[in-house]
Amino acid sequence: MVVLLSSRPLVSRLLARSTLTFTRRSAVKPIPRVSFHCSGNKEQSNNGSAWLDLAASSKHARTYATESSKPASRPKAHTGRTPAKRTATTKTTTPTKKKTAKPKKKKVAKKPKPKTRAKKAPTKASIARDARKSRSDLRAKALLDEPKQLPRTAYMLILVEESQKAGGIKTGSPSASQRYRSLSPEERERYNHQANENQEKNRVAYKKWVQSITPLQTKQANNARRLLNKRILAAGMKQKVPLIQDDRRVKGRRNGYTFFFAERHSSGDLKGMTLAESGKLVGKEWKEMSASEKKPYTDKAEADKARYVEEYRTVYGLEPAASSKPSAKAL
């Protein structure tokens, strides 16, 4: 059904819109002009279709004007380079280990330093007590419990008899000396015979006692006796403690000079000389000797060293102490 617009004011408004100018020419076909004269039925039908075409074209013109109202952007100049593709960088996150808190060390309370007491000066009594103890220990190591010796000479027999009469050696000594000088030959023979028997008894008893202790004990006892003798001399006394005579004792090693000295003395060329004179002469000869001349004596010294080491191990059951370097005199 076609609606005919016969109102004059509507027609005028439509015409006014159709006469608007556009910023850009439309790409559609130009709108044909339509005659607005109203005539018969045929003419009215043609006018109605013309109105519809006009309305459609005006609608198209409005939409085109709104679409092209924004200015078109200018195309960018082509530089000939291909735009670099942006690569999305993915951060690799490593899992962080949680730091384990170290256990706090407990502070050890420092012990207070003990107060050092000032050492008291030793008293005379303590010094004497220590000296007595040291002397007692040394005498115990010296093995002074050896069997008592019987009088081994005629004079000693007479001194014992006179001391028993007088009540002591000091009081009996003068009379013992006078009596010994006035002995008859028969009395002297009798006392000498008894003294010889006592010497044999002493030898047997002493040997038996020495065999009851080990060679190592003998060695240690002699070391203690040497120390005792040093103290006796320091104290101004003359009587010494004799060393224990043990045939099992290991004889000390000898060096080359000792063998040479023994040979020179046995030759008889040093008769009438004192030990100091002969020693000075032999020492000078040894220094003037060449190494080849000393060799026979040094060879003997090496053999004697091997003997000493072997005997020391066998007798004492110990390794010998490291021997010191041979002296220049021995070389």
Image: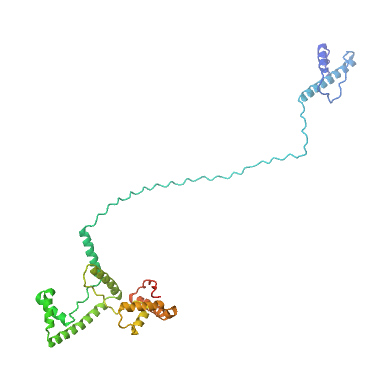
Q: Residue at x 44, y 80 (%)?
A: 292
Query: How many numbered marks appear?
Result: 0
Asked where in the image residue 211 lies, by quadrant, the reply is bottom left
Q: Position of residue 287 (x, y in %)?
A: 40, 76
**242 left or right of 318 in image:** left
Residue 249 visible in the picture: no
Task: Work out whether residue 218 or residue 278 is closer to the camera in this orientation and state it.
Answer: 278
Task: Work out whether residue 83 or residue 299 is closer to the camera in this orientation and state it.
Answer: 299
**29 left or right of 206 in image:** right
Asked where in the image residue 194 lies, by quadrant, the reply is bottom left
State the scheme by which the image is colored: rainbow
Q: Residue at x 9, y 75 (%)?
A: 166
Asked where in the image residue 6 lies, by quadrant, the reply is top right
Q: Position of residue 142 (x, y in %)?
A: 25, 71
Residue 275 visible in the picture: yes
Task: Work out whether residue 160 or residue 26 is closer to the camera in this orientation and state it.
Answer: 160
**90 left or right of 10 in image:** left
| 12 over 178 or under it: above or below | above
| 153 over 64 or under it: above or below | below
- Quadrant, the N terminus: top right
**Residue at the left extreme, as displayed:** 165
Task: Work out whether residue 287 or residue 77 is closer to the camera in this orientation and state it.
Answer: 287
- Quadrant, the C terminus: bottom left
Q: Residue at x 23, y 63 (%)?
A: 131
**305 left or right of 193 in image:** right
Q: Position of residue 66 (x, y in %)?
A: 77, 23
**Residue at the bottom extreme, as displayed:** 186
Q: Position of residue 156 (x, y in %)?
A: 16, 80
